[in-house]
Image: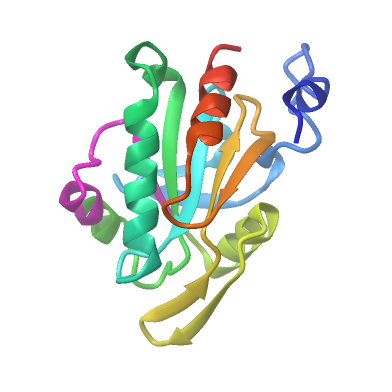
Amino acid sequence: MDTELANTSIKNDGEIPEMSIFNLPSKWTNQNNENISLLDLKGDVLVMVMIYTTCTSACPRLVSDMRNIERQIPDEQKNNVKLVFVSIDPITDTPTRLKEFAKENQMDSDQFIFLTGSVEDTREFAAVLAVSYKQISPKDFSHSNIISVFNKEGVLMHQQEGLGVDNAETVAKIITESNY
């Protein structure tokens, strides 16, 4: 999606754009056991990915890709960016488990947010991101590998698909959006 096109949908009167994820009614719980809505994230560029903490194949690579992206964001812009991990396994990924996972992966700063929600809210959010997932065993899921960038108004600006791909375009989009 072209940034200029998306920015035309941002309203100056404080209203949320029609295509914003902040319009979703979903409720989430973060790794600190705090209940939040996506609207609570307004004002930051959001880099979002859907994972599950017991994954041993794609998710560790997605976590690595997110850390790589975070390292490339200039320090002066990091306060305007949040890296958000949304669990596709809300049964296993409790706030306590997400907190442990954040610590295990040295992502326990305010810049990293881990969310878990109801099965219904998770499915709705996945549909918005075009992330497909399916439980294939009691502890395993098959899922898309997509990292999404949302502007400060919650409008999708960019998606990166795949594992270990060149993320220069994703980082450039994050830097551009955090300057608005």
Residue range of the region highlighted in magenta in the rendering: 100-115
Regarding residue 40, the answer to whether it shows in the image is no
Tell me which colouring the rendered structure shows: rainbow
Image quarter of the C terminus: top right
Q: Nearer the viewer, residue 64 or 28?
A: 64
Residue farthest to the bottom, as pictured: 137
Question: Residue 143, percent across and down?
Answer: 52, 70
Residue 100: x percent and y percent?
19, 55
In this rendering, position of residue 103 left or right of residue 12: left
Q: Is residue 119 visible?
A: yes
Residue under the point 30% across and 70% down: 54
| Residue at horizontal 66 percent and vertical 41 percent from the top | 21
Is residue 77 shown above or below 59?
above
Q: Inspect the magenta stretch and tell me whether residue 11 lies in it.
A: no
- Screen quadrant of the N terminus: top right
Residue at the spot x=39%, y=72% of the render?
Answer: 91
Q: Name the foreground residue: 125 vs 175.
A: 175
Q: Is residue 99 left or right of residue 128?
A: left
Report the side of 32 relative to 46 (left or right). left
Task: Measuring from the top left, give residue 150's x and y in whole percent.
Answer: 60, 34
- Magenta stretch contains residue 108: yes
Residue closest to the eye, 155 or 18: 155
Q: Position of residue 136 (x, y in %)?
A: 48, 86
Q: How many marks?
A: 0
